[in-house]
Amino acid sequence: MRSGSFTRREFLRLAGAGAGAAALGALLPEHGEAQAGAKPNIVLILADDLGYGSLGCYGFKDAATPNIDSIASDGVRCAAGYVTCPVCSPTRAGLMTGRYQQRFGHEDNPGPPPVAAANFGLPETEKTLGDYLKSAGYVTGCIGKWHLGHRAACHPMKRGFGEFFGFLTGAHSYVDTLAGTDNPLYRGTAELAKEEYLTDALAREAVSFIDRRKHGPFFLYLPFNAVHDPLQAPERYKDSFPRIAFPRRRSYAGMLRAMDDAVGKVLAKLRSEGLDEKTLVFFLGDNGGYRLPGESLNTPLRGFKGETFEGGVRVPFMARWKGKLPAGKVYGKPVLSLDVTATALAAAGADIAPSIEGVNILPHLSGQRDSAPRSDVYWRFVERSGARVGDWKLVNSGGGAPMLFNLAEDPAETNDLSKDRPEKLKELQEAYRHWDERNVAPRWLDGRRAKKPAAGAGDSAEK
């Protein structure tokens, strides 16, 4: 950080950290270091391609999700929770580093290993949340979908995690864990033989990690691949949804139920070990739901995975820390996936590096601070881009003129105000360009597509 001066982002981050210390009392004393034995465990659960309207607590009706919903009822549900990209790998890069991933060129998915760029992977210059928490005395484990590089230097156990069970690249079969030769399942660095239904295997391993590390403090990162394609539901749910006529929707509902059961096992283990009040739990999606019929719902939002409309970047987002955060609260101000990193570090009493762009949201979620954690959010996904500043949203959909929406009046982005409010459009474009000045060109593009890296808000492009 520069001596004697602060950017607005740095000020908000540090102010948030200070207020968080006051809100958490003895847990986070004046100097920002947790007292001996008081560091909370941290569980970060990430769902894959889960649309905004795909959980019971966000209005989904086809399949009950009581366990995931309990995180909201026992904690805080964020109604305006955002991620930094509308696709998988870049969002994970931002989440793990606490930085906009465009700062270091991790802007696109790579495509499957046979077509992925040779340099794909989280740059070794970037530290992860696992790195930070490991340095703060945490035992760290990653169980699930990594998708931040399949080269040896990118392996989770080289990037801050002491344990790993899962796979390194994108989509993976749920029922045939030996399917394909380019995305094997690993325990540590050893390839595994055939496993049970994959979501169940991840739950089993997560519970085992908690059991072995319950004396803590531990950091469990649990990125499910559910409900990403392929649509493969467990057999035990085959006849569980007779009211759903569409086969793809039935399969999706079964996959969602399996993930909810898996989350339930993790929460039950925390409860049985007396760790509820000693554990900060986050749950969020990595991007919006896919556009194919029968899959995730982004209702009532416009757009899908891969787009910078709300349906591509606004996701289920909740936090639970019993005894520290209120139960059943709905928080309406914007929060961002980068904030998870800063919040976890603040709770752990660890230093928040100046490069981290997230904000400690604990004092905001607890009610200690009335102000919004952040006034603006930005997106750049190759040709598509966007910005939210206050209640105003700029969208460049990649194929035409830029659009402007007032989310307070029009959360579904149905009324383009760009011609009615040209001065506001210009204001948001200028804010976007100022943010974009610190970004670098994409280090790779998805190997399945030929694209031009033209990402300026308002520029014409195609997906």
Image (cartoon, rainbow, N blue to C red):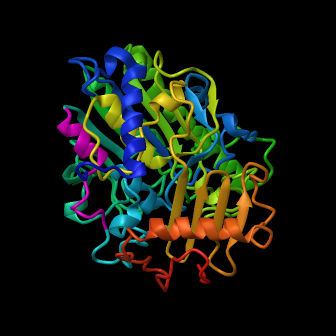
Q: Give above or below for 209 relative to 249.
A: above
Residue 60 image offset from top left, x and y in percent: 72, 41
Q: Which residue is nearer to you in this view: 159 or 346? A: 346
Q: Give above or below for 42 relative to 294.
A: above
| 16 falls in the magenta region | no
Q: Is residue 451 left or right of residue 106?
A: right
Q: Quadrant of residue 45?
A: top left
User: Is the C terminus in the top left, top right, bottom left or bottom right quadrant?
Assistant: bottom right
Residue 285 image offset from top left, x and y in percent: 53, 48
Q: What residue do we see at 43% from left, 48% from top?
A: 338
Q: What residue do we see at 34% from left, 49% from top?
A: 6
Residue 309 image offset from top left, x and y in percent: 66, 62
Q: How many marks?
A: 0
Q: Which residues are magenta?
A: 121-136
Q: Give above or below for 325 relative to 82.
A: above
Q: Is residue 203 left or right of residue 303?
A: left
Residue 394 image offset from top left, x and y in percent: 64, 65
Q: Which residue is nearer to you in this view: 358 or 300? A: 358
Q: Which residue is nearer to you in this view: 372 or 49? A: 372
Kindly give the residue lying farthest to the front in the view shown.
Answer: 4
Q: Which residue is nearer to you in this view: 296 or 78? A: 78
Q: Is residue 410 left or right of residue 318?
A: right
The answer to whether residue 197 shows anywhere in this view is no
The answer to whether residue 68 shows anywhere in this view is yes
Q: What residue do we see at 64% from left, 38% from top?
A: 332
| 131 falls in the magenta region | yes
Q: Quadrant of residue 241?
A: top right
